[in-house]
């Protein structure tokens, strides 16, 4: 497979608007609860996406281009978003995510990354050597992982409401696929 | 849990715009393939959603209100969408889904369904007795099931591109949760 950066950037440009259209103004019944004790609400997921847009993906792109494999990326602080999202509404967090993504895409496009840059290597703190192509592809699929999660969090709110349909609705069979950050 | 029809209608009003924002204009690399032999592409999923908007959900609402449990719903023809979607672009199918949903929501709202109507019963061809509340809730969660599926179909296209990140991206661990229609 020939990796094409523009495909990743296209997806990264579409997901914020898609999540905004799905969630903005949705009744609280859908968004105020998670999937059970200690799990994320939809608001938590958007806060996490908005946080990583500031602290993770672009800083990693810059670190890789500047330091190569000589200096590892900073690990993701998977609790930072809880502090930073305190008191912010889902609507406000969606706005932060949309704006930060737009800014990051402008920055990436301005870098005019070609095949040589995409093959350059950096050091992930737990995964080891990764290429810039892999980093930008993972950024896009990270959006999809959280879209997957959000569809499930929403569906779980209606597990009882759908009555006997529960067995036919695939999303209600999903138990999640959590992995360390 | 007190079932609130307006919550279902709100979700049903949001999902078409969300899918449209996600998929319209996305490069073919994301949308032309499924998850392997015999699986659905993103276009197939949207064709299925557009088809059921015409042949399934509203006709079932009408049948339940008219005939109660005396006459079962027609079974879903899970292949009809293949015939009806032949030659149509993803963009065109998204438009059909958006327009049919809008029309259906207008019709449902015009019925002014109250608690008495929502408790009324109909007959599902394989699930047996269901209430109108369950039918409308299942309609909403059916959207979420396919959003869940679409996030996975898209992600699978990048399984190799993300390199070592594969193990961290939950959506790539999902093997689907298909069930009979």
Image (cartoon, coloured by chain):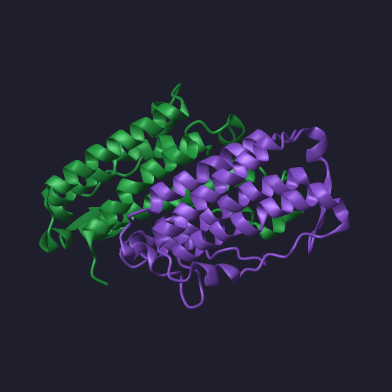
Chain colours: A purple, B green
Q: Is residue B123 above or below residue B74?
A: below
Q: Hey, which residue is sitting farthest bottom in the picture?
A: A37
Residue A9 on image: x %, y %? 62, 39
Q: Residue at x 38, y 40 (%)?
A: B49
Q: Quadrant of the N terminus of chain A?
A: top right
Q: Residue at x 62, y 68 (%)?
A: A78
Q: Along the line of sight, which residue is nearer the eye, A164 or B168?
A: B168
Q: Answer yes or no: is residue A170 visible.
A: no
Q: Hey, which residue is sitting farthest top in the picture?
A: B87
Q: Answer yes or no: is residue A86 visible.
A: yes
Q: Quadrant of the C terminus of chain A?
A: bottom right
Q: Residue at x 74, y 36 (%)?
A: A113
Q: Quadrant of residue B95?
A: top left
Q: Along the line of sight, which residue is nearer the eye, A101 or B95?
A: A101
- The count of marks equals 0
Horizontal side, residue A42 vs residue B63: left or right = right
Q: Hey, which residue is sitting farthest right in the picture?
A: A70
Q: Along the line of sight, which residue is nearer the eye, A122 or A161?
A: A122
Horizontal side, residue A60 vs residue B145: left or right = right
Residue A19 on image: x %, y %? 45, 50
């Amino acid at each position: 497979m020939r990796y094409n950066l523009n495909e990743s950037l296209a997806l990264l440009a579409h997901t914020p608007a898609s999540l905004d259209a799905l969630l903005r103004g949705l009744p609280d019944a859908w968004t105020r609860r998670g999937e059970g004790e200690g799990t994320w609400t939809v608001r938590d997921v958007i806060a996490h996406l908005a946080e990583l847009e500031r602290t993770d993906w672009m800083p990693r792109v810059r670190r890789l281009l500047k330091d190569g494999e000589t200096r590892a990326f900073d690990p993701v602080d998977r609790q930072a978003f809880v502090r930073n999202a305190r008191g912010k509404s889902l609507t406000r967090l969606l706005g932060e995510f949309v704006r930060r993504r737009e800014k990051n895409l402008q920055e990436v496009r301005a870098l005019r990354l070609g095949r040589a840059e995409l093959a350059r290597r950096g050091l992930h703190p737990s995964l080891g050597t990764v290429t810039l192509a892999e980093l930008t592809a993972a950024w896009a699929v990270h959006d999809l992982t959280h879209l997957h999660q959000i569809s499930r969090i929403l569906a779980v709110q209606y597990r009882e409401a759908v009555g006997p349909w529960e067995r036919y609705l695939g999303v209600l069979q999903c138990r999640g696929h959590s992995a360390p950050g």
